[in-house]
């Protein structure tokens, strides 16, 4: 667990020092605690919770109330890392005023340190306004899950030179707008390197190769808790689902066969108290 709270200045400095940044997602108190104990730099309360926690098909249905609820839980357990609240779809897309209000709500009501939103050049003025309002922003370009349907699905982005150049332009626009860092999702590894070289703020990759300034993964993917589908860029460090499942099945068997609870899980009563109780019942 970190002794000091990670700040946006530490995140910016990491790139200058050539130190890779470590970022994971968390959606509740126990995972907030563990991410803190593991000593990661950044914890994202991502709208990926729509899929891995709420069982939705995507992130579009996630709203401000869902985000605030989960951010609060993570914040209670996670004290060292910088905590990012993800702005849900349509919380920043309709007007700059709405975007500032909602970014402020994630911080004031949720308690996160900074916010993240998806989009490139088209969202530069929104980002600039949120930053001017005093709220640090992390950008998110490449594959942007909230608008995956407009991008043709959950597909790699920046395949040809023209599309790749647009992503580099997006990164530059985000830097000019004042982001302290940005996520780059699902692009060819050589493009990841070029984007990281094109901007002075840290570029944190998810499916963007190794030559970026840090990595982020959805924790539930990385530990094999959510395995409905596993994107190519995910490394599963463990497969926790079968372990949990076998514990649930063992519990079910124990209950059905009356082998749980055993004496060690049961409260005792003195023989004297029990005898008195029997008499009371009879009287
Ligand atoms: O919502 C999320 O978890 C994200 C990550 C994929 C970066 O945006």
Image (cartoon, grey):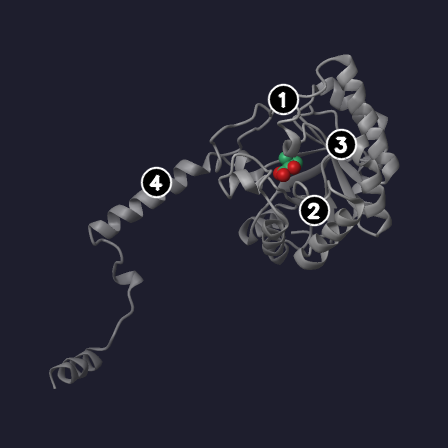
The answer as to whether callout 1 falls within 8 Å of ligand 1 is: no
Residue furthest toward the left? 282
The answer as to whether callout 3 falls within 8 Å of ligand 1 is: no
Residue 280 higher or lower than 68, as above or below:
below
Query: Which residue, given by chain and number where applicable, does mark 2 sit on?
Result: 84
Mark 1 and mark 4: Cα distance apart in space: 38 Å
Please state if 105 lies on the left or on the right of 271 as rendered: right
Mark 4 and mark 3: Cα distance apart in space: 39 Å
SS type, badge 2: strand
- Mark closer to the observer (3, 2): 2
Nearer the observer, 90 or 56: 90
Q: Which quarter of the picture shows residue 268? A: bottom left
Query: Which residue, given by chain and number where applicable, does mark 3 sit on?
Result: 213
Mark 1 and mark 2: Cα distance apart in space: 27 Å
Query: Which residue, given by chain and number where applicable, does mark 4 sit on?
Result: 246
Q: Residue at x 76, y 18 (%)?
A: 163
Q: Quadrant of ligand 1?
A: top right
Pointer 3: residues within 10 angstroms few (<14), some, or many (20+)?
A: many
Mark 3 and mark 2: Cα distance apart in space: 17 Å
- Counting residues from the start of the chain, the first of labels 1 and 4 encountered is 1
Res. 3 in view: no
Q: Position of residue 56 (x, y in %)?
A: 51, 38
- Counting residues from the start of the chain, the first of labels 4 and 3 encountered is 3
């Amino acid at each position: 667990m970190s002794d000091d709270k990670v700040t946006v200045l530490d995140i910016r400095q990491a790139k200058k020092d050539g130190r890779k940044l470590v970022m994971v997602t968390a959606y509740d108190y126990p995972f907030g605690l563990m991410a803190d104990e593991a000593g990661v730099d950044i914890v994202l309360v991502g709208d990926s919770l729509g899929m891995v926690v709420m069982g939705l098909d995507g992130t579009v249905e996630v709203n401000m109330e869902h985000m605030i609820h989960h951010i609060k839980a993570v914040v209670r357990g996670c004290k060292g890392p910088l905590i990012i609240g993800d702005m849900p779809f349509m919380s920043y897309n309709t007007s700059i005023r709405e975007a500032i209000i909602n970014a402020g709500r994630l911080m004031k009501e949720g308690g996160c340190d900074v916010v993240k939103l998806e989009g490139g050049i088209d969202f530069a003025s929104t980002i600039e306004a949120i930053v001017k309002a005093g709220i640090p922003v992390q950008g998110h370009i490449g594959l942007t899950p909230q608008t995956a349907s407009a991008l043709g699905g959950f597909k790699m982005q920046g395949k040809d030179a023209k599309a790749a150049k647009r992503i580099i332009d997006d990164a530059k626009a985000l830097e000019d707008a004042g982001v302290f860092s940005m996520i780059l999702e699902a692009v060819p590894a050589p493009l990841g390197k070029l984007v990281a070289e094109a901007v002075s703020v840290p570029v944190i990759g998810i499916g963007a190769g190794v030559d970026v300034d840090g990595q982020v993964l959805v924790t539930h993917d990385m530990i094999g808790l959510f395995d409905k589908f596993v994107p190519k860029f995910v490394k599963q460090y463990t497969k926790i689902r079968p372990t949990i499942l076998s514990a649930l099945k063992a519990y079910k068997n124990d209950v059905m066969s009356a082998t749980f609870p055993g004496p060690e899980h049961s409260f005792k009563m003195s023989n004297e108290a029990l005898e008195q109780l029997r008499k009371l019942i009879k009287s």
